[in-house]
Amino acid sequence: MKRKIAIGVIGLGKRGIGLLKGVILPREDVEVVAVCDLYEDRRERASALVETATGHRPAAVNNYAELLMMTNIDAVIVTASWTEHLSIAIAAMNAGKYVASEVGGAYSVQECWQLIEAYERTKSPCMLMENCCYGRDELMVLNMVRQGVFGEIVHCSGGYLHDLRNEISGGHVNRHYRLDQYIHRNCENYPTHELGPIAQVLDINRGNRLLSLVSVASKAKGMQEYVQRDNSTNPELAGVDFMQGDIVTTTIKCARGETIVITLDTTLPRYYSRGFTVRGTKGMYTEDNHSIFIDGRHDQDHGDWRRQWGNADTFREQYDHPVWKNYLAEGIKGGHGGMDWLVFNDFFQSVRQGTLPPIDVYDTAAWMSISALSEDSIALGGQPVAIPDFTNGKWISRRAK
């Protein structure tokens, strides 16, 4: 095993720079040997950060194909815009590199199949860096599910519930990808934050699979009103008709019979939440009031059910996931409350050991495909759409770790 993992970072916008500063450069087992972005100022900023932290200046290129040709690179981190995630990941696998791809949604089912075919041809692993799978509450609930605390799981829900109007409207000024998505597409465009933790709870691709979905979208008025009221950042948007519905609701049916509801809600005023909820025959968890209800234990409070709001922390001592128990003892690091550090820790461990990552290429394809499939369903007036089995039947025998 190598002492240090040599990596290249492709995409140096807000996310790429944030990961460099908060997660990658603080590690002693990783060496950044190359960075890549279309924009010179971003390449210069990243190179300077690496040089300041390590004393060594990385190679800086504007074409990721050039980076992928570097034989001294073990793995690449893809933090470019949504439009390029899968194409860069496929090129990196073809170049024999381990791939860590940031999240987003696919544009077509075909590109998801191309990702699967690239892996099965090259055997170069690809991990979707879905940090929400590493949230403390998400992992505690997963631990409780696996211990049978909630009984048989029947239904889960979640959402990307995040007021992004300011970020979206400043897209062209900030060179951010979201604006064009909201002008031209109408779909569940960011499915993996909510779906990732639910997929783990429901053993998706490991004894269960996503079978079909129905998506509906509300009218698109939130961004239109916002840019008309506050058009100082990007005044030309005042006359733009946005395609993206303000609320997109997607209902998914699973092979074992469970249902999932995920909601995209990013263009109306609201508080932040991922709405993570798990319902079973013996109890439930819900994120929005941070509560757990156990059958036979909390029934007496039906008349005053608010007494149980916020009680999830009382379950920590018994059910906190071992990953978080160790993490708290060592000290929380990195961004997004520590989730970024944990997801990258698993990726780098896989690279070092030459093993498959915990969120693999089949998960990547299944979760990201929801965007393209929801777009089809919405365009068809909410018609059911089949979700492909990207494992080609292997979900039946694959098992969760």
Image (cartoon, grey):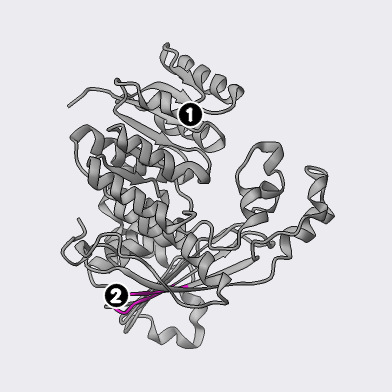
Report the disc number at residue 255: 2
Number of numbered markers: 2
Residue 386: percent from left, percent from top: 39, 72
Residue 270's place in the image compared with 278, above or below, is: above
Say whether marks 2 and 1 touch (CB < 8 Å): no
Q: CA distance from mark 2 to mark 1?
A: 42 Å
Residue 43: percent from left, percent from top: 54, 22
Upstream in sequence: badge 2 or badge 1: 1
Q: Is residue 398 rendered to the left or right of residue 81?
A: left
Label 2 is placed on what type of residue?
Answer: Ala
The residue shown at (67%, 37%) is 174
The boundaries of the magenta stretch are 251-260
Residue on which disc 1 sits: 21
Label 1 is placed on what type of residue?
Answer: Lys
The residue shown at (30%, 33%) is 97
Q: Per the image, is 304 magenta?
A: no
Of the 4 image quadrants, the one containing the N terminus is top left
Residue 208 visible to the viewer: yes
Could you tell me which secondary element the residue under label 2 belongs to?
loop
The residue shown at (23%, 47%) is 120
Residue 341: percent from left, percent from top: 38, 39
